[in-house]
């Protein structure tokens, strides 16, 4: 493929992913797509006891492992029980929110789609009428009016009635970008190094139930599926903040709301960014570096479990579908941020075998010049012994 064809493939892969309904504990559609992609391109993987997918490509001499981690769920909801309430007499179902969406975003009626028997070929439309806060900021009960349909039971999941995917004015708009863009980027990094037959040691880790507490990631780390020396890169769509601007490139993430990440892990990302920028026309490859304090991500979990971790974020508009006017809206990222991020991860994987040399070169470049050392030595006599 040439670069234009690759861009089309990368966008098509993302479009296919974001068009699949998902939420915490109901990620099977996304996981099936990931498995089919890995099978198609003969990329080996395993599925752990909790449904997390761990893919691994390795070729050439032993080198530092790198794991690209992304989660397969997104905030949505799960049915609890049928029936109306005094506050919402038109409602015929209640549901529990799965993930972090503020209560204020449910004050306006919102179209929803629920899947009977959790079968996405059996959509039932309806309206979210309102919500109430229970015993915690994320424990929110939703009140729904659903159209008649067979097969609806407690535990069926539903999603917001928003468009699957639209590419408009240089931006990608979709119901779900967080974190299916991370899943797409990890898959495409694995695909590229395998197509090239590159010497590297790359994992792709696709986790479940991140939105309700980083659950899948914690279980992967606890099981020690990844070697202890693995550098973990948490891939996220993280809400835009000052210094993390849409259209200015993916963001090498130095920390999140809870933790400062590792310079040791970040080093290889920065070297890949420098290489890409040096080989391109000036100012054509944009990559940012910033603290993204808007939320916790799986790099924090990696650090707590003893791994060395950093992150890469795609600046996200309408984070968790929370539009600026307190209505649920499609999320959005800049098209070029996505395409650059995919290529940055591919370049990072290619550089892994050269990591010791790159570190040595950096140390030499940053070392104090010998002349300054000698001047300190020569002026030592000014000080008493």
Image: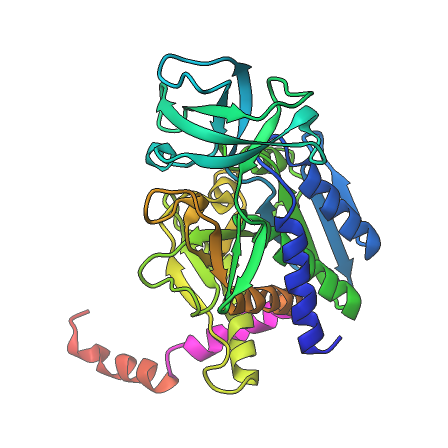
Instruction: Please provide percent x and percent y for residue 97.
Output: 47, 28
Instruction: Please provide percent x and percent y for residue 41.
Output: 81, 57
Magenta segment, which residues?
353-369
Residue 337 higher or lower than 76, as above or below: below
Residue under the image location 48 percent in, 38 percent down? 304
Residue under the image location 71 percent in, 31 percent down? 119
Residue 85 higher or lower than 384, as above or below: above
Residue 113 higher or lower than 136, as above or below: below
Give whichever of 32, 18 is nearer the camera: 18
Instruction: Please provide percent x and percent y for residue 174.
Output: 54, 52
Give whichever of 376, 269 is nearer the camera: 269
- In terms of image quadrants, where is residue 194? bottom right
Instruction: Please provide percent x and percent y for residue 189.
Output: 67, 61
Residue 212 falls within the magenta-colored stretch: no
Residue under the image location 67 percent in, 68 percent down? 8
Check the picture and name the quadrant holding the C terminus: bottom left
Left or right: residue 319 compared with residue 225: left
Left or right: residue 207 compared with residue 109: right
Give whichever of 374, 325 is nearer the camera: 325
- Is residue 49 visible to the viewer in this orientation of the structure? yes
């Amino acid at each position: 493929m040439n670069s234009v064809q690759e861009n089309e493939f990368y966008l098509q892969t993302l479009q296919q992913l974001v068009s699949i309904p998902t939420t915490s504990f109901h990620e099977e559609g996304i996981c099936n797509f990931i498995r089919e992609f890995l099978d198609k391109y003969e990329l080996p993987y395993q599925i752990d006891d909790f449904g997390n997918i761990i893919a691994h490509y390795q070729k050439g001499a032993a080198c530092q492992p790198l794991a690209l981690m992304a989660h397969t769920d997104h905030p949505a909801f799960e049915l609890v029980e049928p029936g109306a309430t005094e506050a919402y007499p038109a409602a015929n179902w209640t549901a529990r929110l799965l993930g972090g969406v503020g209560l204020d975003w449910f004050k306006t009626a919102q179209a929803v789609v629920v899947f009977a028997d959790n079968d996405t070929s059996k959509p039932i439309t309806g309206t979210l009428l309102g919500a109430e806060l229970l015993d915690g900021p994320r424990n929110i009960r939703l009140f729904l009016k659903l159209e008649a349909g067979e097969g609806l039971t407690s535990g069926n999941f539903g999603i917001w009635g928003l468009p699957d995917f639209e590419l408009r004015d240089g931006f990608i708009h979709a119901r779900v970008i967080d974190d299916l863009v991370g899943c797409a980027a990890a898959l495409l990094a694995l695909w590229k190094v395998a197509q090239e037959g590159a010497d590297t040691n790359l994992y792709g880790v696709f986790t479940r139930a991140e939105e309700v507490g980083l659950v899948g990631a914690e279980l992967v780390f606890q099981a020690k599926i990844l070697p202890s020396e693995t550098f973990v890169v948490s891939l996220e769509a993280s809400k835009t903040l000052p210094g993390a601007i849409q259209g200015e490139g993916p963001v090498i993430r130095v920390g999140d709301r809870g933790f400062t990440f590792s310079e040791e892990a970040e080093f290889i990302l920065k070297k890949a960014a420098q290489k890409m920028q040096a080989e391109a026309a000036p100012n054509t490859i944009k990559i940012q570096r910033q603290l993204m304090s808007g939320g916790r991500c799986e790099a924090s979990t990696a650090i707590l479990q003893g791994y060395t971790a950093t992150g890469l974020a795609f600046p996200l508009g309408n984070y968790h579908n929370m539009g600026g006017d307190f209505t649920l809206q499609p999320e959005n990222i800049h098209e070029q941020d996505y395409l650059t991020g995919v290529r940055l991860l591919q370049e990072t994987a290619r550089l892994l075998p050269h990591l010791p040399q790159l570190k040595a070169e950096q140390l030499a470049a940053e070392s104090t010049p010998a002349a300054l050392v000698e001047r300190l030595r020569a002026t030592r006599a000014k000080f008493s012994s």
